Image (cartoon, coloured by chain):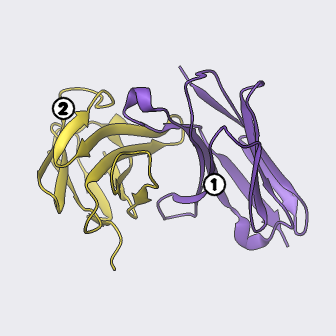
Amino acid sequence: QQQVKQSPQSLIVQKGGISIINCAYENTAFDYFPWYQQFPGKGPALLIAIRPDVSEKKEGRFTISFNKSAKQFSLHIMDSQPGDSATYFCAASNAGNNRKLIWGLGTSLAVNP
Amino acid sequence: DAGVIQSPRHEVTEMGQEVTLRCKPISGHNSLFWYRQTMMRGLELLIYFNNNVPIDDSGMPEDRFSAKMPNASFSTLKIQPSEPRDSAVYFCASTRGQSYNEQFFGPGTRLTVL
């Protein structure tokens, strides 16, 4: 049972465009929502994270938008660059399960030059 | 400061053989995670240690899998006997404190079981 559903599975964007990746969850106890970035041959690395007390968090070209009522959160990459080509994972956790991260299946992003 | 270190980076073995994957977490981190990554199932948490004690091993697929953390700087994941369906990339990650914090991943071990 996939508790965090991520879409799309793959995404192709032109350089300078906006990349949008969406995640939906069911467990209302989740209270921490990180996004990880993974380059080929490497392990995932934390990109940006949000708590449900805010609706948006921005770090440079990367923004998380959070909709608590809809139980959805999304990653927006502004001015996408070829160097952003990677696999992106959303995740969620809560204190009730030892803060175990529940992962989405990932989105493979390709930014064309 | 070195990141999480995993060895070997690649392992090819035959079905039925024992496989041991190794991990050295970042110094000072007291939580360690073993993950398995496949295209079909994504990232799966296998086991989570805190202060060298297994906290959650509900993700360990079956008795063929075992993990140990004899001290704060070393952990192993063992598969015995290995099967072709165990082929995957296995990641080790560490963090300071509870798993709420940023997890730092190693480069992974790509395991192929023939």
Q: Residue furthest front?
A: A53
In the rendered image, which quarter contains the N terminus of chain B?
bottom left
Q: Which residue is mark 2?
A: B64
- Residue A60 x, y percent position in the rendering: 76, 68
Give the side of residue A16 with respect to residue A81, left or right. right
Q: Which residue is mark 1?
A: A87
Q: Residue at x 71, y 41 (%)?
A: A9
Q: Viewer-nearest of labels 2 and 1?
A: 1
| Rendered view: A3 above or below A39 | above
Which residue occupies the foreground of this view, A58 or B10? A58
Chain B tint as drawn: yellow
Q: CA distance from mark 2 to mark 1?
A: 30 Å
In the image, what residue type sits under mark 1?
Answer: Thr
The chain ID associated with circle 2 is B
| Rendered view: A33 above or below A35 | above
Q: Residue at x 90, y 68 (%)?
A: A16
- Residue A104 x, y percent position in the rendering: 59, 37
The chain ID associated with circle 1 is A
Q: Residue at x 91, y 62 (%)?
A: A17
Q: Residue at x 24, y 45 (%)?
A: B50
